[in-house]
Each structure stands twice: as structure tokens, then as C-alpha cells.
Image (spheres, rainbow, N blue to C red):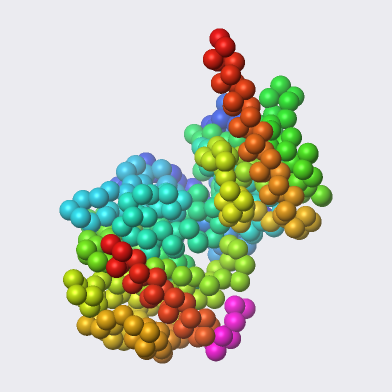
């Protein structure tokens, strides 16, 4: 089959590629772009280890074709840190032991990144509901939920700090 | 695993999609959100030589109120339905179903049109459409036709859509002054398909008598079905414990589940009886509040 040219913005960088229509987005991200932080877990649209943001919404990249990402903005786990500094959600997962084997972690973080952009102060129930498409087989979820709650606090604190600076200026 | 090879088209206009479908007579398949089709392709349960991705067609993703009806573009995502104030306010039955389909990540891509036209008896929107008495605007190169939800679901994975036709819009009928609905889905684990699902829409007159009842069932028959006997039974009655119990018994009598991974026939019928009672209570409460 003929390859198709796609243009997308991946972690803030414009990228043009030629892909086979049947190639899944997750394989494009991992194999063509070398961004292996996005994982393939179940490969049956259940586990969410492959979660990335497409135009700001968290989706399972194993259940989307790379050609469908043409003209879209993609954010992967590699796109969260700034100048070597971890994103507050990443800091929170470290601090609160939100991982054991780490396989599901990038998906957990991307799904939470989507939630915390919409809702800066989610309840525990909202956090748990939002994670219903992300499976963890190690931790029993409690530490993950604690990490996200802590991340929301960190993010709100960062905002207050920024606002403070703006007021001073 | 990647799906088997196929040729891919992403038309921007619906007319282009008709042309592509016509050119590959009988061999092209429509892709919308892809949350059912892509897993089928990946698991190699099906292979399709030509995929027509309609998700880039303009003006098929909207929720609009017009003449007291609600018009929903077929490409509207389940997440958009879940977050729409007019859906939540006027058609809570759709909110209930939308917020329980698969998981939030799937809902971000899955569409209402795909959920309906895939014809999966375990999909949730078909039962809701039957309960609401929705109408489907179906477009093709020949023009447009309107089909009732009732009669649209022919068999498992078979709907009234013919090759070359695209479900373009869903019309939800005007809601009465004392009308509301509820959808309840019983599932074993988060994100799973249901053991059974029930959609109930009830309209009362000013004296509290049921003027109209719509009931649709999920996962308890080879296709999504209406519970006509129960609908007729409820009409003209007032809500009460014995009436709800009898309606639930009739719903179960009209179901036709089979024993599978999700449970035995007997178990599914017990689940259906319980969620039907709960859904009628909830729909009635909501309708009376209106």
C-alpha cells in the first residue's frame, strides 16, 4: 500500500513523515519518532499504557492510526518536562511512590495531565473515575491517586506563586 | 499489532466520501472514532481493503437545539455528549449512557454515530435511541432519508444502513414538560461491556399518569431491542411499587439473553429485573422534578 504523508506537531516540534496507513499511532511514536516513553501494554484497547494527548485530549494511541494524527498536535510523556525539570505530576509520582514497575506510569501521568488541565482541584472520586481506562497491576492504585492529589496541590501552588510574581511586577 | 494492509481515504466533504464508497463497491468501510473498528482490525477479526475515514468531514460534530428538538451530528464524541449542558439538562438518559461507555480515553474518540451504526448489541446508545424514539438522518449519493431508531437495528452488527450510506445526524424528539429518562448499565469491571443495560424514558401528564414510556435493552438479545409490552403496560398507569415490579417482569419476559462470559441466562435476567426497577424509579423521580 502507498505510504501517506502526514504532518503533525509532536511535543511542540513540527514533524513530517511518511507512514503506511495501517500503522498504529503508538508504533509511529515509538518506532518512527523514537519516543519510547509511550508503552504498548495490552494492545487490545484496555490498559491505557499507550495514552498520549491528541489535540489536548487523552487517547489510547494503540487505538488510533498514525494517519489520523495528520494535522494534529500530539503530546507524549517526553513533552512534559521543561529544560530538564520534571513536570509537577512527574515530581508527585516520585514523591508519593506512584509507581512500582513503572510500565503503566507514562499512561497514568498523561491521563492525569489531561484531567488536571480541565480540573485543577479534582476530588478523589473524579481522579479514580478519570483513571478507569488505565490499568496498574502492581500498586493497587492508592499511591497513584495520592500522587495525582499531590500533583494538583503542586500545580495550584505553582500558579499562586506565578500570580504572586505578576502582582509584584 | 498493526492491522492488515488497507488503502486509506480521508475525505473533507461528505460527497467525496460517497464517491469513494461507490468506486470501491461493497469493499470500503467507514471509520469514524475507530474505537470499535480499529480493535477489530488489530485483532485481525476482520480485514478491509479500503478504509474511508469520515472524521475530517466538516459540520458533523455539533449539538444543536432547533424547534425544541435536539440535533446531534454523528461525529459528536461521547465525551462531548457527557460534557454538554443541554444533554445533561434535557436528556439525562444520554448523559447516563455516555458517562458509562468504556472509559474516558475511549470516550474522547468514540462517536455517537459509530456507537449506533456499528450495530453491536452490547453498545449502549442503541437502547437509549430506542427509548427516546430518536430519528436518524442517513445521507448517500441519492440524497437523504430519515429512519426511526425503531426498526434500525436488524441483527447483531447489522443495521438498516445500506452500503454507500452514512449516518449523518441524530434527532432527539421534543421532551415533554414532565418527562425524563435513565440508563443503567451493570458491568463486572470498569470499562467493560455490560452484563445487561436498560434505558427508560417516561412522560407523565399533569395528573401524574404515564402518558408515554420508552424502554430499550442492551446486551440481553442478539440485537438492541425495545420492550413493547412493558411500554404499553406502563401507559395510562401511575407509578407505584407493584406497577414497577410488573413492568420489570414484562421487560425480562421480552429479553432473550444467552449464556456467555458475562453470565448465565438466569443471572442476566435477575440483573435485568433489578436494574429495570431502579431505572423506572429514577426516570420517574427525574420526570416529576421537571
Which residue sits at x=28%, y=86%?
A: B233
Which residue sits at x=25%, y=50%?
A: B65
Q: Residue reaching furthest top? A: A169
Magenta-highlighted residues: B257-267
Q: Residue reaching furthest right? A: A101
Magenta stretch secondary structure, dominant: loop
Q: Is residue B170 above or below residue A3?
A: below
Residue A161 visible in the picture: yes
On the image, the x and y values in percent for residue B111 come to: 43, 54
Given residues B120 and A6, the one toward you in this image is: B120
Number of residue marks: 0
Given residues B98 and B30, the one toward you in this image is: B98
Q: Is residue B248 above or below residue B148?
A: below
The verdict on residue B57 being magenta is: no
Residue A66 visible in the picture: no
Q: In which quarter of the image is the C terminus of chain A?
A: top right
On the image, the x and y values in percent for residue A99 come to: 78, 47
On the image, the x and y values in percent for residue B270 come to: 52, 85
Which residue sits at x=38%, y=76%?
A: B280
Which residue sits at x=32%, y=43%?
A: B59
Q: Quadrant of residue B42?
A: bottom right
On the image, the x and y values in percent for residue B120 come to: 47, 69
Amino acid at each position: 500500500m502507498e505510504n501517506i504523508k502526514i504532518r503533525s506537531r509532536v511535543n511542540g516540534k513540527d514533524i513530517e513523515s511518511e507512514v503506511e496507513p495501517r500503522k498504529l499511532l503508538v508504533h509511529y511514536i515509538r518506532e518512527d519518532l523514537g519516543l519510547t516513553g509511550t508503552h504498548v501494554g495490552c494492545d487490545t484497547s484496555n490498559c491505557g499504557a499507550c495514552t498520549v494527548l491528541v489535540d489536548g485530549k487523552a487517547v489510547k494511541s494503540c487505538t488510533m492510526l498514525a494517519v489520523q494524527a495528520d494535522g494534529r498536535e500530539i503530546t507524549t510523556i517526553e513533552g512534559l518536562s521543561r529544560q530538564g525539570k520534571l513536570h509537577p505530576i512527574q515530581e508527585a509520582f516520585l514523591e508519593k511512590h506512584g509507581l512500582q514497575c513503572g510500565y503503566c506510569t507514562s499512561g497514568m501521568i498523561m491521563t492525569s495531565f489531561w484531567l488536571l488541565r480541565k480540573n485543577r482541584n479534582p476530588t478523589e472520586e473524579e481522579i479514580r473515575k478519570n483513571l478507569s481506562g488505565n490499568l496498574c497491576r502492581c500498586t493497587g492504585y492508592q499511591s497513584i491517586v495520592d500522587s495525582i492529589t499531590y500533583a494538583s496541590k503542586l500545580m495550584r501552588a505553582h500558579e499562586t506563586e506565578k500570580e504572586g510574581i505578576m502582582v509584584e511586577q | 499489532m498493526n492491522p492488515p494492509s488497507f488503502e486509506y481515504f480521508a475525505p473533507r466533504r461528505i460527497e467525496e466520501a460517497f464517491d469513494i464508497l461507490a468506486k470501491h463497491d461493497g469493499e470500503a468501510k467507514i471509520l469514524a472514532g475507530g474505537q470499535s473498528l480499529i480493535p477489530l482490525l488489530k485483532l485481525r477479526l476482520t480485514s478491509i481493503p479500503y478504509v474511508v475515514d469520515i472524521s475530517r468531514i466538516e459540520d458533523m460534530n455539533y449539538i444543536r437545539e432547533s424547534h425544541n428538538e435536539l440535533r446531534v451530528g454523528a461525529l459528536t464524541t461521547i465525551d462531548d455528549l457527557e460534557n454538554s449542558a443541554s444533554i445533561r439538562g434535557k436528556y439525562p438518559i444520554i448523559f447516563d449512557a455516555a458517562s458509562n461507555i468504556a472509559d474516558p480515553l475511549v470516550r474522547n474518540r468514540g462517536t455517537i454515530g459509530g456507537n449506533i451504526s456499528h450495530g453491536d448489541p452490547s453498545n449502549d446508545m442503541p437502547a437509549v435511541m430506542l427509548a427516546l424514539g430518536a430519528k436518524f438522518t442517513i445521507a448517500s449519493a441519492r440524497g437523504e432519508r430519515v429512519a426511526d431508531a425503531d426498526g434500525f437495528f436488524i441483527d447483531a452488527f447489522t443495521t438498516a444502513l445500506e452500503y454507500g450510506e452514512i449516518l449523518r445526524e441524530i434527532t432527539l424528539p421534543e421532551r415533554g414538560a414532565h418527562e425524563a429518562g435513565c440508563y443503567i448499565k451493570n458491568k463486572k469491571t470498569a470499562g467493560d461491556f455490560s452484563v445487561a443495560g436498560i434505558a427508560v424514558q417516561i412522560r407523565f401528564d399533569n395528573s401524574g399518569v404515564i402518558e408515554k414510556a420508552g424502554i430499550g435493552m442492551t446486551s440481553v438479545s442478539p440485537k438492541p431491542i425495545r420492550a413493547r409490552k412493558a411500554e404499553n403496560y406502563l401507559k395510562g398507569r401511575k407509578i407505584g411499587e407493584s406497577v414497577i415490579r410488573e413492568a420489570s417482569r414484562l421487560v425480562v419476559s421480552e429479553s432473550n439473553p444467552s449464556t456467555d462470559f458475562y453470565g448465565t441466562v438466569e443471572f442476566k435476567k435477575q440483573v435485568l429485573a433489578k436494574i429495570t426497577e431502579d431505572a423506572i424509579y429514577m426516570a420517574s423521580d427525574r420526570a416529576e422534578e421537571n
